[in-house]
Image: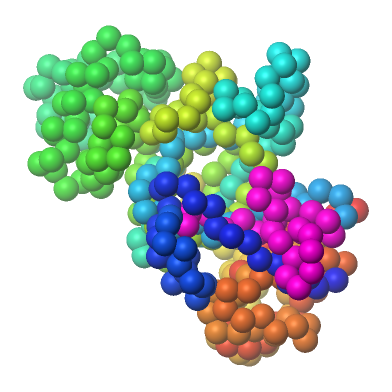
């Protein structure tokens, strides 16, 4: 089955007004275009082209992934996502408490986990992702340690085991946190380090927010086009600027940690967060053919395959283990006799493979294992 799909980008305030139209050759709306959703998620199911209905009407069962084009002109909220067990427990507890699923005070809107990957299209793509070793934060702060407003943070940051109590102190605006935020913003003005650059960006977007200081505990990562991050359950992150292809499990469970006017449930966030100091979660691709990169995370919900124009022009066959969504972002490609032009997407089901040719750039989201 081949079904052409489309959608209207979500108009979140942080979205770029130009990036998605420039990428896909669409007419700008005049407002922010933050995320183009291509999937069956009820929050914004893709529409069927040429007939009434949405992708949810033709998918058999639950489509386990959601493909997005993301275009951030300003920072998104600090956030993390639950594991499956945490999502099931949280969803059941909020249901039992009688909190409406669409309530702004709700943390769990479904019983599913929401790991995700982001593939950078822009160069650069900036993101905060995960806690870094405390020694790195201490080294950054050492030149400004004579500022008595910063001293309480250094006193608390003893080693990596300090990350959880320090995070809790910051996010709850404990004693001295407001003064600390003001001090690190001042310090950022005289240093070009990428972490101080992040402080400046966040201070401009969210003045006085604890997330400004929290960012100093985290990796600031600057991706080049073609690099990808994988953000598993519990990873605290925020996209700061750039355009990318985002692929995630089909869920709407978000635990926010600042840089937002939306609901922040601190106790629940503390349950979900992974406070280990870990390396930047870069996801290296498999390269089964020249010009083909396969980004396969640890979860079975999704895999992203990227086909370059050179690979498409040579012709190739991509195996599938379940339903897929293909998006062309440049030129044109032919998939099993179906032509896909720039900006067009198609849903594919009940096919063992895709035969691809043409001169375009193609992104294929699919399941990571065979589906029933």
Task: Say if 135 sits above or below 57 in the image.
Answer: above
Residue in view at x 71 percent, y 13 percent: 97
Q: Is residue 20 left or right of residue 173?
A: right
Q: Do we see residue 272 in this rendering?
A: no
Q: Is residue 211 left or right of residue 296?
A: left
Q: Quadrant of residue 138?
A: top left
Closer to the camera, 295 or 355? 355
Residue 59: where, in percent of width, then height?
A: 83, 57
Q: Is residue 197 left or right of residue 102?
A: left
Task: Say if 154 sits above or below 81 in the image.
Answer: above
Residue in view at x 53 percent, y 79 percent: 330
Quarter of the rendering occupied by the N terminus: bottom right
Q: Is residue 328 left or right of residue 257?
A: right
Residue 232: where, in percent of width, then height?
A: 58, 41
Q: Is residue 39 magenta?
A: yes
Closer to the camera, 357 or 208? 208
Q: Quadrant of residue 5?
A: bottom right
Assign the magenta stretch its main secondary structure.
Answer: loop
Q: Quadrant of residue 271?
A: top right
Residue in view at x 49 percent, y 24 percent: 264
Q: Is residue 67 magenta?
A: no
Q: Do we see residue 29 in this rendering?
A: yes
- Magenta region, residue range: 33-58
Task: Say if 265 sits above or below 129 in the image.
Answer: above
Residue in view at x 73 percent, y 70 percent: 49
């Amino acid at each position: 089955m081949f079904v052409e799909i489309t959608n209207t980008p979500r108009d979140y305030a942080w979205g770029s007004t130009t990036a998605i139209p420039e990428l896909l050759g669409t007419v700008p709306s005049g407002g922010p275009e933050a995320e183009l959703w291509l999937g069956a998620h009820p929050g914004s199911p893709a529409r069927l082209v040429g007939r009434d209905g949405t992708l949810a009407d033709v998918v058999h069962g639950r489509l386990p992934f959601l493909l997005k084009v993301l275009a951030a002109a300003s920072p998104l909220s600090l956030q993390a996502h639950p594991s499956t067990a945490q999502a099931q427990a949280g969803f059941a507890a909020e249901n039992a408490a009688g909190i409406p699923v669409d309530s702004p005070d709700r943390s769990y809107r479904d019983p599913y986990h929401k790991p995700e990957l982001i593939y950078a299209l822009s160069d650069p793509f900036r993101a905060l992702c995960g806690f870094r070793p405390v020694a790195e934060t201490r080294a950054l702060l050492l030149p400004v340690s004579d500022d008595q407003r910063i001293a309480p943070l250094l006193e608390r940051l003893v080693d990596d085991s300090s990350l959880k109590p320090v995070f809790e102190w910051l996010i709850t605006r404990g004693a001295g946190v407001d003064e600390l935020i003001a001090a690190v913003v001042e310090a950022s003005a005289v240093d070009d380090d990428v972490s101080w650059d992040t402080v400046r960006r966040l201070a401009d977007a969210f003045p006085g927010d604890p997330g400004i200081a929290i960012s100093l505990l985290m990796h600031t990562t600057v991706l080049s086009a073609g690099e990808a991050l994988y953000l598993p359950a519990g990873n605290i992150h925020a996209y700061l600027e750039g355009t990318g292809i985002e692929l995630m499990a089909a869920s709407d469970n978000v635990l926010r940690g600042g840089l937002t006017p939306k609901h922040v449930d601190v106790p629940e966030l503390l349950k979900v967060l992974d406070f280990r100091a870990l390396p930047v979660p870069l996801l290296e691709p498999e390269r089964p053919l020249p010009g083909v990169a396969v980004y396969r995370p640890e979860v079975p919900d999704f895999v992203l395959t990227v086909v370059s124009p050179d690979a498409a022009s040579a012709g190739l066959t991509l195996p599938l283990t379940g339903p897929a969504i293909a998006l062309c972002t440049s030129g044109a490609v032919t998939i099993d006799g179906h032509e896909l032009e720039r900006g067009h997407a198609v849903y594919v089901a009940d096919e063992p493979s895709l035969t691809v040719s043409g001169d375009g750039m193609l992104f294929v989201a699919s399941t990571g294992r065979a589906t029933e």
